[in-house]
């Protein structure tokens, strides 16, 4: 244990204490040799010189360690004598060797010598103390400089830390900026991909459009009639293609500008990447410099530690005397600990910085990877763009080809149109010619013609004894036109325009009528009559047998032909409008068969619900019946429905009025209005199909007042009809109109260019041969109108005088 009072000089001659002090002094000397600056070598030197001087004082060169002799006193350069421990001990233990204790002088001399030595020793001690103080001061200075160094180091470390922090902040900012740029790059890439997909879709649409264009063009070659529409569609297509082409060009330029901007962005990113790399390299430089500083700091720390150790030992040496130094050393130690802590924290921070640096390096590597992937993506996009460009060029080329083809097709279409116009002109001319020829043929055949049709024998016919009353001459002259009727052994021969035997089908009959139907469509007025006794087949001829398609009559077949021809003529630019009306003339009264109010025939009621059905003729030669229902029709089905409606009206009448309908004239009227917009032609045709009332002998029908009236009315109207036909055919000024509604109704349709055809329907039933003969005579009279036989010669005597005409 060190003595507690170490600040005191070794005034007490305690040997142990002195030993400690001597050891400290030795150590101090060693340290002083080591550490003291060269300008202070006097301490060691003084000690050595002091020792020599001590030896000299004691009168020995190298006194033994346990010498009890008087201390040799050696003075230093400045007169200071140094003492060793033994010398001091010896000095202190020295006993005055007074030979004569009463010799005061000697005693005084010895005492004064001893005092002198003591003074010298004290002086040496004082000097030593001064040296200690100086050394302490030096140590203080050293500590201060070490502290300063430490604080400098701390400041430096703080500055480095701040610098590192600022670098980290900068790096973070750079990373954020790079991340933002990466996000922008990503969005740009997505947009580019979007554009690519849109472009792809647009290209597919273009290809489809192209395919449709080529289809359209092919169809244009095939279908001449739809040329005009196709021109329009091709024009539209061409416009769309042009629009699409321009849009593609816009899109291409847009893509190119985007590519340029993407390239710029890439360059910028690459520059930034280089900057980041530079930053990284500078950071690495910083890092190495920091590490160097760290090593130097460590060295400094080691040195400081060493110093600390030295100081510690020194302080321990001086502990007894230099409490302040010790405190300061403790303080220094604490400071050193703080520095060490700081150093540790610095080290940790440095570690963190390292970790962050590593993170940043990783991020930088990631960014580099992303940049490279972006670069790959951009290259891929560029490749896609170039392929899109190629495709665009291809589509441009194909569009150009399509355009060329379109131009070619356009020229072709123009040529075809010219040819079409030419052909249309020819067709119009041809149509005119056809009409003319058709009309000429019909005129040559006769504007008024009479056909005879003999129905087959029916199961309920009363054949009687006379088996065959009707025969057909086989001579070349009258073949197919003649008929012989035998009555009471007398043969009556008639010749008509055509005679249909019982075997003739509805189709055979209609073949002859179809030409007249065409005439009606050409704008002529056509009247087809069926005349004959009751049950002779008039209704069968006109309407056919209900429910049998192959036995359809003239009216349904006519309608079918009319609507079929309407369809065909539509292609030549004709538009037709058809109107139908159906009426009955019974007892000189008109009945509207299509009236919605007409639910059945009621003889007791005032006819026709008070409607007058007044017949009027206009300046154009058309007939109008007031209040008559006229129905616009667009198909034969609609007319069939109306016919059923009319038949129902008639059949009701037949049931309720005792077969009244057989004694009424049924008039079916079809008004045909046609217009050709391309040739500005107009036609107004009328087709009257008439099932005349059955002629009947009064003798057979009985002589009741009503029946007589009916028969007279029928006969009157038929006679009037034949007269009118005759007069009109001969262009007689005076038309013998006999107040017959039928004749008055049909008057504009008879004569002139009008076509009139009468069917003389006869029955082969022998029991009604008289009626058949009557019918044939009437038909022969009408026939004579056309063939130019004077009217007076056509006065055929009938078996029934009341039926004789003329
Ligand atoms: N050419 C024919 N072939 C087959 N059957 C026919 C022919 N002509 C008429 N008939 C039949 O004869 C019958 C009478 O014919 P239809 O009713 O047409 O005579 P009609 O002259 O109209 O008589 P009405 O003047 O009384 O109305 C009907 O059953 C009809 O089917």
Image: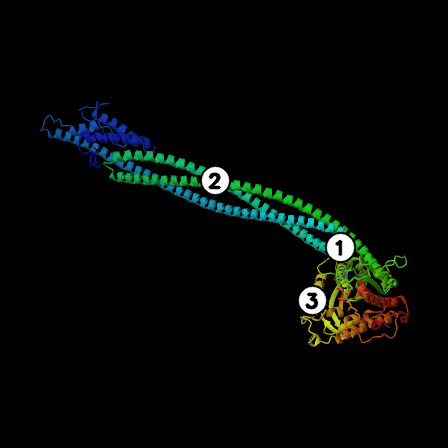
Q: Quadrant of the N terminus?
A: top left
Tag nearer the camera, 1 or 2: 1
Colouring of the image = rainbow
The local crowd at label 1, few if under 14, some if 14 to 19, many if 20 or more residues have their Cα within 10 Å, is many
- Disc 1 + disc 2, Cβ < 8 Å: no
Separation of marks 3 and 1 at Cα, in angstroms? 48 Å
Q: Position of residue 113 (x, y in %)?
A: 17, 30
Q: What kind of element bears circle 2? A: helix
The local crowd at label 2, few if under 14, some if 14 to 19, many if 20 or more residues have their Cα within 10 Å, is few
* Residue located beneath label 3 in the image: 648
Residue 579 drawn above or below residue 292:
below
Separation of marks 1 and 2 at Cα, in angstroms? 71 Å
CB of mark 3 near ligand 1 (< 8 Å) = no
Q: Which mark is residue 227?
A: 1
Viewer-side residue, 740 vs 21: 740
- Disc nearer the start of the sequence (1/2): 1
When asked about the image quadrant of residue 134, the answer is: top left
Q: Which mark is residue 362?
A: 2
Q: Quadrant of ligand 1?
A: bottom right
Q: Position of residue 689 (x, y in %)?
A: 78, 66
Q: What kind of element bears circle 3? A: helix
The answer to whether residue 181 of the structure is visible from this angle is yes
Q: Quadrant of the C terminus?
A: bottom right
Separation of marks 3 and 2 at Cα, in angstroms? 101 Å
Residue 287 drawn above or below residue 711:
above
Q: Position of residue 532 (x, y in %)?
A: 80, 66
CB of mark 1 near ligand 1 (< 8 Å) = no
């Amino acid at each position: 244990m060190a003595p507690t009072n170490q600040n005191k000089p070794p005034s007490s001659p305690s040997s142990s204490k002195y030993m400690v002090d001597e050891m400290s002094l030795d150590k101090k000397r060693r340290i002083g040799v080591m550490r003291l600056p060269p300008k202070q070598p006097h301490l060691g030197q003084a000690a050595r010189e002091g020792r020599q001087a001590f030896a000299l004082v004691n009168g020995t060169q190298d006194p033994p360690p346990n010498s009890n002799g008087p201390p040799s006193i050696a003075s230093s350069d400045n007169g200071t004598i140094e003492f060793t421990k033994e010398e001091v001990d010896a000095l202190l233990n020295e006993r005055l060797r007074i030979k004569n204790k009463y010799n005061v002088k000697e005693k005084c001399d010895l005492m004064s010598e001893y005092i002198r030595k003591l003074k010298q020793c004290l002086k040496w001690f004082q000097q030593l103390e001064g040296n200690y103080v100086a050394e302490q001061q030096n140590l203080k200075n050293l500590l201060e400089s070490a502290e300063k160094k430490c604080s400098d180091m701390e400041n430096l470390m703080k500055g480095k830390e701040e610098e590192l922090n600022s670098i980290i902040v900068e790096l973070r900012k750079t990373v954020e900026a790079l991340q933002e740029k990466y996000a922008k790059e990503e969005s740009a890439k997505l947009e580019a991909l979007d554009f690519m997909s849109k472009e792809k879709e647009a290209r597919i649409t273009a290809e489809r459009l192209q395919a449709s264009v080529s289809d359209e063009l092919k169809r244009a070659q095939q279908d001449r009639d739809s040329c005009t529409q196709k021109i329009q569609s091709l024009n539209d297509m061409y416009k769309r293609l042009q629009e699409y082409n321009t849009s593609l060009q816009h899109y291409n330029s847009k893509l190119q500008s985007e590519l340029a901007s993407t390239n710029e962005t890439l360059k910028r990113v690459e520059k930034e990447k280089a900057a980041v790399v530079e930053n990284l390299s500078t950071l690495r430089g910083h890092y190495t410099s920091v590490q160097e500083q760290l090593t130097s700091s460590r060295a400094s720390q080691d040195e400081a530690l060493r110093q600390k150790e030295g100081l510690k030992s020194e302080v321990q040496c001086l502990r007894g005397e230099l409490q302040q130094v010790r405190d300061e050393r403790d303080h220094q130690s604490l400071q050193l600990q703080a520095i060490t802590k700081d150093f540790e924290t610095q080290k940790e921070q440095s570690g963190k910085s390292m970790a962050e640096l590593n993170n940043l390096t990783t991020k930088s590597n990631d960014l580099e990877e992303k940049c490279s992937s972006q670069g790959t993506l951009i290259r891929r996009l560029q490749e896609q763009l170039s392929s899109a460009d190629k495709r665009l060029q291809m589509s441009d080329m194909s569009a150009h080809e399509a355009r060329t083809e379109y131009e070619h097709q356009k020229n072709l279409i123009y040529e075809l149109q010219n040819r079409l116009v030419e052909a249309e002109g020819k067709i119009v001319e041809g149509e005119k010619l056809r009409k003319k020829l058709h009309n000429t043929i019909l005129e040559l055949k006769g504007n008024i013609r009479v056909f005879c049709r003999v129905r087959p024998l029916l199961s309920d016919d009363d054949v009687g004894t006379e088996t065959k009353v009707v025969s057909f001459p086989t001579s070349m002259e009258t073949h197919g036109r003649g008929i012989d009727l035998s009555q009471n052994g007398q043969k009556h021969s008639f010749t008509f325009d055509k005679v249909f035997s019982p075997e003739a089908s509805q189709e055979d009959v209609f073949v002859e009528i179809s030409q007249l139907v065409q005439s009606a469509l050409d704008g002529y007025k056509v009247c087809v009559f069926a005349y004959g006794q009751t049950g002779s087949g008039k209704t069968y001829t006109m309407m056919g047998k209900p429910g049998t398609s192959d036995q359809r009559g003239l009216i349904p077949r006519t309608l079918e032909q009319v609507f079929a021809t309407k369809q065909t003529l539509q292609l030549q630019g004709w538009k037709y409008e058809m109107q139908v009306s159906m009426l009955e003339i019974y007892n000189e009264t008109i009945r509207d068969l299509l009236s919605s109010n007409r639910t059945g025939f009621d003889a007791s009621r005032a006819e026709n619900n008070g409607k007058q059905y007044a017949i009027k003729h206009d300046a154009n030669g058309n007939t109008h019946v007031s209040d008559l229902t006229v129905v616009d029709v667009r198909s034969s089905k609609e007319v069939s429905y109306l016919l059923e409606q009319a038949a129902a009206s008639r059949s009701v009448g037949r049931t309720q009025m005792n077969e009244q309908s057989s004694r009424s004239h049924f008039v079916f009227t079809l008004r045909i209005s046609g217009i050709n917009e391309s040739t500005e032609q107009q036609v107004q045709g009328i087709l009257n199909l008439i099932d005349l009332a059955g002629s009947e002998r009064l003798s057979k029908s009985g002589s009741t007042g009503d029946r007589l009236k009916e028969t007279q009315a029928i006969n009157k109207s038929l006679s009037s009809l034949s007269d009118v036909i005759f007069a009109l055919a001969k262009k007689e000024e005076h038309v013998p109109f006999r107040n017959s509604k039928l004749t008055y109704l049909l008057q504009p349709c008879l004569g002139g260019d009008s076509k009139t055809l009468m069917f003389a329907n006869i029955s082969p039933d022998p029991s009604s041969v008289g009626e058949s003969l009557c019918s044939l005579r009437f038909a022969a009279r009408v026939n004579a109108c056309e063939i130019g036989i004077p009217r007076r010669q056509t006065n055929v005597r009938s078996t029934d005088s009341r039926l004789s005409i003329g």
